[in-house]
Image (cartoon, coloured by chain):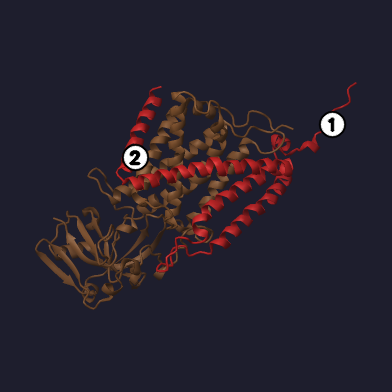
Chain colours: A brown, B red
Amino acid sequence: MKTATLRDTAVTARVGLWLGVVVAVCFVTGLISHFIQHPQPWFFWPTRPVWLYRVTQGLHVISGIAAIPLIIVKLWSVWPKLFERPIIGGPVRQIERLSILVLVGSMLFQLSTGLLNIAQWYAFKFFFTTSHYAMAYVAAGAVLVHIGVKLPIIRRALGEPVDDTPVFVGPTRRTVLRGAWLAVALATVVTAGQTIPLLRKVSVLAPRSGQGPQGVPVNRSAIAAGVLRSARSPDYRLTVTNGATTRTFAVAELAAMPQATRRLPIACVEGWSADAEWTGVVLADLVAAVGGSRDSDVRMISLEPPGPYSRTVVPARHARDAKTLIALKLNDQTLDLDHGYPCRLIAPTRPGVLQTKWLTRIEVVP
Amino acid sequence: MIARITLIVLGVLTGAYGALLVWENPPVIIVRIVVWALVGIVLHDLVFAPLCVALGFAGRRLIPGKWWPPIAVAAFCSVVLVFLALPVYGKPGLRPDNMTVLDRNYPLGLWISLAVVWACVPLYYLAARLLPVRQDEVVEQQGAGDVKPQPPAV
């Protein structure tokens, strides 16, 4: 009876190649999301197609989840090397071991914290976004070093056939590879429905079913934001300012202005997204009402007490876009309190966290 | 060689930038981040991996050779499903003010998906027997019982 040596560089290199591709997609889409939220002068983020962020952030979470089965197979294929002699060895050996330690540690850190974050389970006692961002560079750097170190072995292994010895019984290396692809497909199908509507029904492990008030899920509720009373107050007014010019609008006055209806997705940093029909006042009209320039950024301020997301700045490119609305209605109904009643920002290609809800003040930034 | 050196230098710089960002945290947070990463490694290397070895070792003795490939793949898929189910199964992240997160029946979802995975094992076995197969796959499917005894030495 002959069985194959399954834990082989032929398997490691092929799974590693795919893991590399998936991790690269995850890293780049993650950076995109970071720089939209922390704009840099060199960073350009377009307003079209309107579903761009839905795709990049959906890919971020999908590729991260796809990396889970791949990393399991990859680690499985090299695990015996952990016990290879010399266990400690000379300085070169120690540096190599240390680099693998950093690589595996940072990768497991990224995948585990990401997976917990999309389920909003904060079992770790550190701030998710900053640590996930910092460790992304550690992981990416460790991957680059690892590829650099292993390049000759990778080249050789990819050049050789997967099955070089005939196998009579049991799984072959090809079985391992097929199993890995199959598991990636399965992991995607059971979770990606929160991004890809077609998969909604079969994504049995997705943190969101896509349901919610007015057909759209919620990330931050009115209760969590502490706006239950202020948002429903009869004294509510939306203040729009441009330097010394200030105008205030009651909800009825906003509703009396020319209304526009736009089909735009809301796409969360946690990977879920939903298409919806929003109705309200075009932001550019409000900016024009106080004499603001089309080249100015516009600051959105929420009724929510000061916090990381209670104030956001809409770049001029998005602020002047005809699709950017101060929405009063969602899917033809008055905005639900959890969706930002009395009015909220909805703009193309922006992460949900920057689509400020429960607006109280809009300032044209000089 | 230049490609390798470039990759390594670029990698060290990128990693160092990440370390710098981690370093900006207060010491207690840095410790928590490092511990989280190390616990991941320890759990994998000293718990998960040995457990897989033990399972594989037992499986090889209990399961006939031709059943190994589909069962091994199904077992691996099950592990992946369980990992993905961990953060949603008991809904540890649920908050009463937002019923749009964790709004599925995850135990049911996990059991159904596991059932589908394992139902594929006999289906694969059947398909492998009934469908036309390539020559090397015929060989692959043969067990010890399929091999004819050696002709008697003359």
Q: Quadrant of the N terminus of chain B?
A: top left
Kindly identify the residue that appears in the image at 50 percent across and 46 percent down: A68
Q: Is residue A268 above or below residue B16?
A: below
- Report x, y in % for residue B106: 54, 61
For label 1, count other residues whose C-alpha is less than 10 Å away and answer few (under 14), some (14-19) or many (20+).
few
Q: Position of residue A359 (x, y in %)?
A: 25, 66
Front label number (1 vs 2): 2
Would you say residue B80 is visible in this rendering?
yes
Which residue, as the protein is rendered here, is positioned at the far right? B154
> Which chain letter matches label 1?
B
Q: Chain of mark 2?
A: B
In percent of width and height, residue B147 lies at 80, 34
The quadrant holding residue B21 is top left
Residue A118's disc number? none
Q: How many marks?
A: 2
Task: Compare residues A6 and A274 and report the one nearer the observer.
Answer: A6
Which residue is under mark 1?
B149
**Percent x, y for residue A240?**
17, 66
Element carrying mark 1: loop
Disc 1 and disc 2 in contact, CB within 8 angstroms: no
Q: Horizontal placement of A31 versus A205: left or right?
A: left
Q: Seen from this angle, which residue lies furthest left?
A: A244
Q: Is residue A9 visible?
A: no
The amino acid sitting under disc 1 is Pro
Q: Is residue A10 above or below residue A244?
A: above
How far, Cα to Cα, is label 1 from label 2? 63 Å
Q: For residue A347, which quarter of the picture?
A: bottom left
| Residue wearing tag 2 | B18
* Crowd class of label 2 (few under 14; some 14 to 19; many from 20; radius 10 Å): many
